[in-house]
């Protein structure tokens, strides 16, 4: 067997880990224990396994049919997140100028995308309605992360005997700097 095929082949434990990880809602610790790793090393093994390209690829392969069947893909997720981030409180209430009060709109007449942005509805003992929307900031951050906008870790292999500093240019800057340029100096 060629060396590259052996490198990509999963062990029995790795395959069991992948299957359980996909099945249990992405709980790496439990998947590792189920696959036969010890409880004391499960967290480390799960973390290590999830960095391996062949393991990530196998998990994606396992989940692809389910996601396809449900119609879930990156576009679906990003659309939901965009809808959440764009929901406004004025989508749910009107101001009645005659009574000078805020009136709840008929929720049954709102589009589904607006209803999905509601996390909680409650009514207090005085009859006041409270609507809590999903976390808009979290939705925006999740969209940004999808596009690689918020990287805390610089990815790359920087091994050079003369390397002293690495300057990372932010992806978004007021300066008109090419963000694909990386500056390395002594």
Image (cartoon, rainbow, N blue to C red):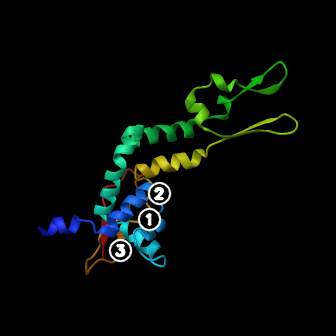
Contact between marks 2 and 3 (CB within 8 A): the answer is no
Which residue occupies the foreground of this view, 36 or 78? Answer: 36
Q: Are marks 2 and 1 in contact (CB under 8 Å)?
A: yes
State the SS at label 3: strand
Mark nearer the N terminus (2 vs 3): 2
Please identify the quadrant where the N terminus is shown.
bottom left
- State the image quarter where residue 13 is shown: bottom left
- First along the sequence among labels 2 and 1: 2
Tell me whether the residue at label 1 lies in contact with that at label 3, contact meaning CB atoms closer than 8 angstroms.
no
Q: Which of the 4 image quadrants contains residue 19?
A: bottom left
Tell me residue 122's x, y (percent): 76, 39
Using the image, determine if residue 174 lies above or below residue 154: above
Report how many numbered discs are placed on residues in the image.
3
Asked which secondary structure carries label 1, the reply is helix
Q: Which mark is residue 165?
A: 3
Q: Which residue is mark 1?
A: 31
At mark 2, the secondary structure is loop
Observer-nearest residue: 120 or 141?
Answer: 120
Which residue position is annotated with label 2?
24
Q: Give the residue drawn at x 68%, y 30%.
A: 92
Label 3: few (<14), some (14–19) or many (≥20) C-alpha neighbours in 10 Å: few
Q: Residue at x 38, y 65 (%)?
A: 17
Determine whether 42 is above or below 95 in the image. Answer: below
Mark 2 vs mark 3: give the one in front: 2
| Front one among 98 and 142 | 142
In the rendered image, which quarter contains the C terminus? bottom left
């Amino acid at each position: 067997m060629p060396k590259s095929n052996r490198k990509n082949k999963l062990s029995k434990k790795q395959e069991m880990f992948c299957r359980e990880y996909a099945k249990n809602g992405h709980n790496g610790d439990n998947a590792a224990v189920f696959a036969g790793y010890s409880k004391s090393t499960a967290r480390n093994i799960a973390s290590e396994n999830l960095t391996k390209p062949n393991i990530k690829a196998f998990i994606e392969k396992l989940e692809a049919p389910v996601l396809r069947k449900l119609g879930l893909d990156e576009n679906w997720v990003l659309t939901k997140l965009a809808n959440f981030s764009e929901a406004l409180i004025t989508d749910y209430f009107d101001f009645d100028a005659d009574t000078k009060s805020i009136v709840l709109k008929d929720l049954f007449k709102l589009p589904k995308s607006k209803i999905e942005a509601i996390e909680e509805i409650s009514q207090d003992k005085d009859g006041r309605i409270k609507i809590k929307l999903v976390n808009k900031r979290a939705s925006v951050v999740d969209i940004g992360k999808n596009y690689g906008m918020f990287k805390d870790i610089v990815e790359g292999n920087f091994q050079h005997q003369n390397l002293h500093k690495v300057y990372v240019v932010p992806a978004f800057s007021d300066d008109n700097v090419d963000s694909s340029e990386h500056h390395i100096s002594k």
